[in-house]
Every structure is written in C-alpha cells, then in structure tokens.
Image (tube, helix red, strand yellow):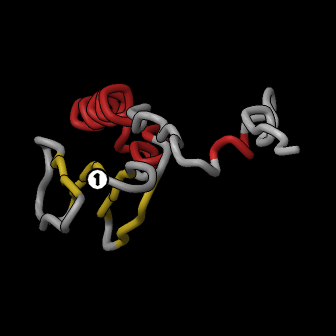
C-alpha cells in the first residue's frame, strides 16, 4: 500500500503473520511498522521495532531484521529537507542583526 507522499519499504524476510515495513514520509518523521503475533505497532526507534520479536530477536532472521532496521534508519532516518530561506520583506523583522528601519531615510 502506498499513500500519497509516502514510500513503504518491506523487510525481505516478511511472512504472513510476521512483517516489518519502513515508511518514508514527505512530511514528518519516517517510521517503522511491525506486525507480529497479531499485534501491529508503529515505532520511531529502529531497535524498538526489532525488540518486538522478544526472544526470537536472537535467531538468524531476528539478527537480519535488526540489521535491516539499523540500515533503514541510517540511510533514511536523518534526511532532512533544506531549510527554507525567507526572502520576503517581513524577513527583515526577523533578522536580529539589523533593524527594519536601517534602510529607510527620513524625509524633512
């Protein structure tokens, strides 16, 4: 399922009753969704997603999931949009180093 402005990446080892996805969003933070033992939860922390496996996290597939979660977070978790630069007239008011009246002349 792909929603507008969202890309869903699936863990290769997903099965019918045990699946993990990483959701890359256009706005807001990216997140994980885990579906395991009839429970579906959202996670911001990659290790918290992996920990939903309980003792199964120490199996080979559990270790692969942990690595996948860490890889997704490293690759996409810290991506941020470029900061918006305000070039409007009102931006002069926000500039602490100058005053809005610095570029004005007094008419006498």
Q: Residue at x 28, y 37 (%)?
A: 65
From the viewer's perspective, is residue 70 above or below residue 3?
A: above
Q: Residue at x 36, y 52 (%)?
A: 32
- Tell me where residue 98 appears, x and y as whole percent: 79, 30
From the viewer's perspective, is residue 106 above or below residue 1?
A: above
Q: Residue at x 27, y 32 (%)?
A: 68
Q: Residue furthest right?
A: 108
In the displayed structure, does residue 74 sit left or right of residue 43?
Answer: left
Of residues 86 and 71, the one nearer the viewer is 86
In the displayed structure, does residue 26 sit left or right of residue 48?
Answer: left
Q: Residue furthest front?
A: 108
Q: Residue at x 49, y 43 (%)?
A: 45
- Is residue 84 visible to the viewer in this orientation of the structure? yes
Of residues 24 and 62, the one nearer the viewer is 24
In the displayed structure, does residue 75 sit left or right of residue 87?
Answer: left
In the displayed structure, does residue 91 sit left or right of residue 42?
Answer: right
* Residue to which mark 1 is pinned: 23
Query: Residue 75 occupies which quadrant of the picture?
Result: top left
- Is residue 53 visible to the viewer in this orientation of the structure? no
Quadrant housing the N terminus: bottom left
């Amino acid at each position: 399922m792909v929603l507008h402005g969202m890309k869903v990446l699936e863990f290769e080892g997903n099965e019918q009753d045990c699946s993990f996805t990483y959701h890359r969003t256009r706005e807001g933070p990216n997140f994980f969704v885990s579906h395991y033992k009839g429970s579906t939860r959202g996670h911001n922390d990659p290790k918290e997603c992996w920990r939903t496996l309980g003792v199964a996290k120490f199996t080979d597939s559990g270790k692969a999931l942990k690595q996948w979660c860490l890889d997704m977070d490293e690759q996409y978790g810290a991506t941020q949009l470029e900061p918006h630069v305000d070039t409007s007239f009102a931006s002069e008011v926000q500039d602490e180093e100058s005053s809005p009246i610095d570029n004005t002349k007094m008419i006498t």
